[in-house]
Image: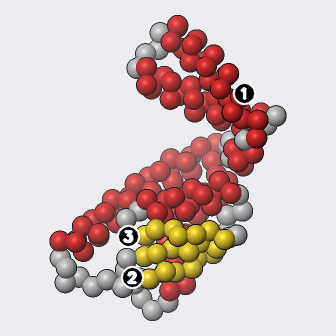
Amino acid sequence: MKIKGIAVIFILLLSTWLVLNHSLQLPIILIGVGLAAFLSLIMCDKCSVFNEIKFTPKAFLYTFLYIGVFIFELFKSNIDIARRVLSPKLPINPGIVKAETILQSQMGRLILANSITLTPGTFTIDIIGNTLYIHCVNIEGDDMEQYAQNIVRKFEKYLEVLYG
């Protein structure tokens, strides 16, 4: 059994239970602890993906920094796409770019790909090894590799601390 994976699932399940119940009464907490423990032991027989998470003070800080950067990029790209929809004269230059990532963990690459996809105007098509193929609504500049690396680097520097 992977203790780290079980602990992560337990914390996620218990947190979800407490948020959904809107209560910190002792019976609610005890039921939540029991259910979370039972489900995490059953579900996490092979939770190797959660073993890649680092539990350090620096990783904890970088989690919040990553969330801030993600929200900022999400807001910025929503504004850009809204401008393009409302002003059809704005040029678009769609295409698929190839970006290499330095992230070695599966979970780190998954979160990176999802962060790119959740940001309007970009969509991760595929991940092959350490290479991400990203569709972009508007590729800026002549250097497609540099453009692709700029997309990846804004998230990658935080995820590297969290997942290596």
- Residue 70 visible (yes or no): yes
The disc at residue 94 is: 2
**Relative to 95, residue 155 above or below:** above
Q: Nearer the viewer, mark 1 or mark 3?
A: 1
Residue 78: x, y in percent? 31, 63
Q: Which residue is drawn at 72% across and 35% down?
A: 44
* Quarter placement of the C terminus: bottom right
Specify the label residue 55 is tagged with.
none
Three-letter amino acid code of the residue under disc 2: Pro
What label does residue 121 carry, if any?
3
Q: Which quarter shows the N terminus? A: top right
Label whose residue precedes the other's in the sequence (2 or 3):
2
Residue at figure coordinates x 17%, y 76% from the top left: 87
Give the image location of residue 49, x and y in percent. Answer: 70, 48
Which mark is first along the chain, 3 or 1? Answer: 1
Q: Is mark 3 on a helix, strand or loop?
A: loop
Query: Is the Cβ of the residue at disc 2 closer than 8 Å to that at disc 3?
Result: no
Can the viewer see residue 51?
no
Residue 37: percent from left, percent from top? 67, 22
